[in-house]
Image (spheres, rainbow, N blue to C red):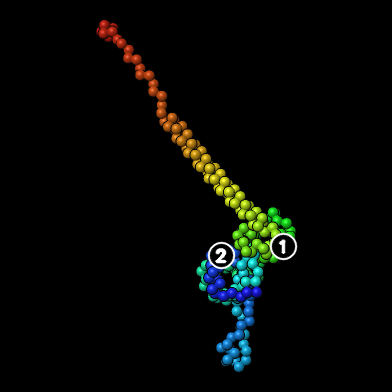
């Protein structure tokens, strides 16, 4: 196992989707209490062991209190930390491989064994990590990428259909409102009556 340090963590700053953390509580010597009590005194301290998904042996141990100060990495791993504190399994970011029907049982076990837990993890695997997954790793990564692209295209199409349906409904509402306005206007207009024909009287008739 290779133990890394802060410099390694800095190099991983742009690869946060590819890392996962194993959390643990360590018994650490409290030097002040040891000196005060005259015996070795320990206290609990939270640590996170940072790994790259799909790779073995390279670990960066980090105090949680220091990790929380890392504004790039901490937002990515904080949900995992909260789950650990609550005694739950860490949430899987993306589509869980366990729910993805395109893997055989053996392929799924190989991926999970390397902490590749989602389709997104598999699609983002670095070339150097593929050898740990098995002989079909390149094909599996491409399959994951193709599936994600197809899902994204389907999502865009669904969003466009939803938008068109909303626009269509809006046009129908406008048409109904216009029809009602026209009908109301027609009701206010009365048909003009023909003007009465003036009777012509003969002046001689009026004198009688």
**Relative vertical location of residue 38 with respect to residue 89 in this rendering, above or below:** below
Give how far apart the Cα atoms at labels 1 and 2 are.
24 Å
Q: Position of residue 33 (x, y in %)?
A: 58, 88
For label 2, the SS is helix
Q: Which mark is residue 109?
A: 1
Apparent side of residue 183 relative to residue 18 in the rendered image (left or right): left
| Quadrant hosting residue 189 | top left
Q: Which mark is residue 15?
A: 2
Residue nearest the viewer, comparing 177 with 171: 171
Apparent side of residue 175 relative to residue 95 in the rendered image (left or right): left
Residue nearest the viewer, comparing 8 with 104: 8
For label 1, the SS is helix
| Quadrant hosting residue 108 | bottom right
Q: Position of residue 185 (x, y in %)?
A: 42, 32
Q: Is residue 196 visible?
A: yes
Q: Residue at x 56, y 88 (%)?
A: 32
Q: Residue at x 63, y 52 (%)?
A: 147
Lower sequence index among marks 1 and 2: 2
């Amino acid at each position: 196992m290779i133990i890394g340090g802060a410099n390694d963590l800095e190099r991983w700053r742009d690869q946060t989707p590819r890392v996962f953390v194993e959390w643990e509580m360590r018994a650490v010597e409290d030097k002040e209490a040891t000196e005060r009590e005259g015996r070795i005194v320990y206290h609990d301290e939270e640590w996170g062991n940072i790994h790259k998904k799909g790779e073995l042996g390279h670990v960066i141990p980090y105090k949680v209190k220091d990790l929380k100060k890392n504004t790039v990495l901490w937002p990515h791993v904080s949900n995992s930390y909260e789950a650990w504190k609550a005694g739950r399994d860490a949430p899987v970011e993306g589509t869980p491989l366990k729910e993805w029907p395109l893997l055989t049982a053996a392929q799924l076990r190989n991926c999970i064994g390397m902490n590749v837990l989602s389709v997104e993890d598999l699609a983002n695997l670095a070339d150097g990590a593929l050898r740990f997954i098995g002989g079909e790793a390149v094909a599996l990564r491409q399959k994951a990428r193709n599936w994600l692209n197809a899902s994204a295209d389907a999502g865009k199409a669904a969003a466009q259909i939803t938008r068109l349906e909303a626009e269509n409904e809006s046009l129908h509402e406008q048409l109904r409102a216009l029809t009602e306005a026209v009908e109301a206007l027609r009701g206010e207009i009365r048909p003009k009556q023909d003007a009465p024909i003036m009777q012509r009287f003969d002046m001689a008739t009026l004198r009688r």
